[in-house]
Amino acid sequence: MTHSIPDAAETTPPDSATERPPDATTVVHHQNRPVLAARSLVFSYGNTAALRGVSMHLTRGEILAVTGPSGSGKSTLMLCLAGLVTPDAGEVRFGDQVISAEKEAFRSKLRRTDFGVLFQFGQLVPELTAVENVALPLLLAGVKRSSAITAATTWLDRFGVAEVAGSRPPEMSGGQGQRVAVARAMVTEPSVLFADEPTGALDALSGEQVLTQMVRVVREAGTSVVLITHDATVAAYGDREIVVRDGMIDGADHG
Amino acid sequence: MSTGHVLMGLLSTRERHGYDLKKDHDERFPAARPLAFGQVYATLERLRKKGHVEAVEIERVEGPDRTVYRLTGDGRAALAEWLSEVEKPSPFVSNPLATKATIALLVADEATAADYLRRQRDAHLARMREYTRLKTDPQASIAEVLGADYAIAHLDADLRWLDTALDRIAALDRSLASSPPPTPDDKPLKDFS
């Protein structure tokens, strides 16, 4: 399944770079257009400010590590970016679309088609086998069962867990379960994968296997990744890092 | 770290000459400083005098003669003893990062110290990315992976310290910002004399 990504480069007014004849520089510029961007995001839980004016961007095919101490606001930032919560102020843009202004039904559809979300504990459905878990997003999107199972099997294989296709989550190791969860997040071939502490519950070597395979697969697929972590050894799998402290980006949006 | 024990460890698999040992060492331990030839030959001579290695033959090929060494029984026992000893944990008393941050606070202000720490954090993470790429390369040898793991763990310790230092300086900054303005009788804030 493939999806067309709304691209800011195709819809925004031409700037000096796009007005020049196409050349290598223009191509690079086009590829570096943000696939996802946030501007001045503010979000509070009651009286507690979680985000206090966060601006950031994610370019196509980039793995962006979002780090910061516990309670810094990094997970809230991910929830806003993925459209799981609506910011109190500011906007989230996916290509040319301001998704933070859209209704929940629209954002929900976006999460089924263009966004993949992965949490620390894979949140697999315990009653379903690995292959059924991975096929689930496709079935919810209306794909025929046989096609969904075939695609899910391929994705399990890409993550090196084909052997647990018929196993249920309680029968798998933590590392296997998390690889199945990444396969499920990737099965719709999303433009953006959101991963919140994806290896937080795993030992070092299992975490390394999950991350190594995840990075290899997203590089092949050209998927952009927002990797939320408090762990620098996990952030080091990214291309760039932003640090969230006290609900704000610490220093410049650097990298 | 004793170069003698490392060379004995390499000799334990088969006898060979100094040139081979240097090459093998540098390939197996890419993160370590390459051995100088002079250091290898001086160490082998020292080990020979102690009876831990012995010269078995002189290889005469093109170029200079090469003495082939073999690990002796005494050498094997010394090696086994060394392997059973734990290394003394480093005290880490000399920390240029902490020194620099302290001096930044002394001569400038919290913002300068925090800016330095942030840039140091970026440099550390960039190095950590290099080691992460190295160890996740399917072609990486076990020696490279182990060396990268070690480097990453140490960089990670520094990074955790850098984060704590940034938190401390931010807290210091806030406490200064919330303190009442100094009266003419107050000492200057930066009087460390």
Image (spheres, rainbow, N blue to C red):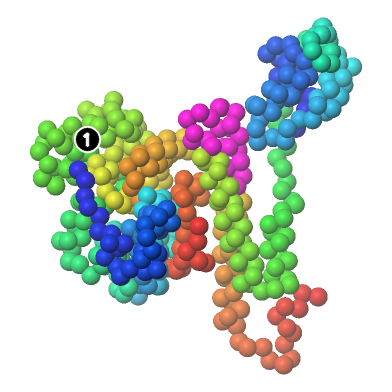
Query: Is B125 above or below relative to A243?
Result: above
Task: Give how far across and how far down residue A166 sits, in percent.
Answer: 22, 28
Residue sitting at 10 percent across and 45 percent down?
Answer: A142
What crowding class fits label 1: few (fewer than 14 Cα within 10 Å), some (14-19), or many (20 or more)?
A: many
Residue under pointer 1:
A152
Q: Which quadrant, please, contains the N terminus of chain B?
A: top right
Q: Answer with the quarter of the image where residue B52 lies.
A: top right
Residue at the farthest bottom position: B184
Task: Give how far across and how far down residue B45 sits, in percent.
Answer: 87, 19
Q: Answer with the quarter of the image where residue B9 lies.
A: top right
Residue at the farthest right position: B49
Q: Which quadrant, please, contains the C terminus of chain B?
A: bottom right
Q: Is residue B36 magenta?
A: no
Task: Give how far across and how far down residue B17 sits, in percent.
Answer: 77, 15
Query: Is A107 above or below relative to B80?
Result: below
Q: Determine if residue B73 is in view.
A: yes
Which amino acid, by three-letter code, is at mark 1?
Ala
Residue sitting at 56 percent across and 50 percent down?
Answer: B126
Tell me which chain the residue with mark 1 is part of: A
Position of B135 with respect to B181 (left or right) is left
Q: Main secondary structure of the magenta part?
A: helix
Q: Which residues are magenta?
A: B134-156
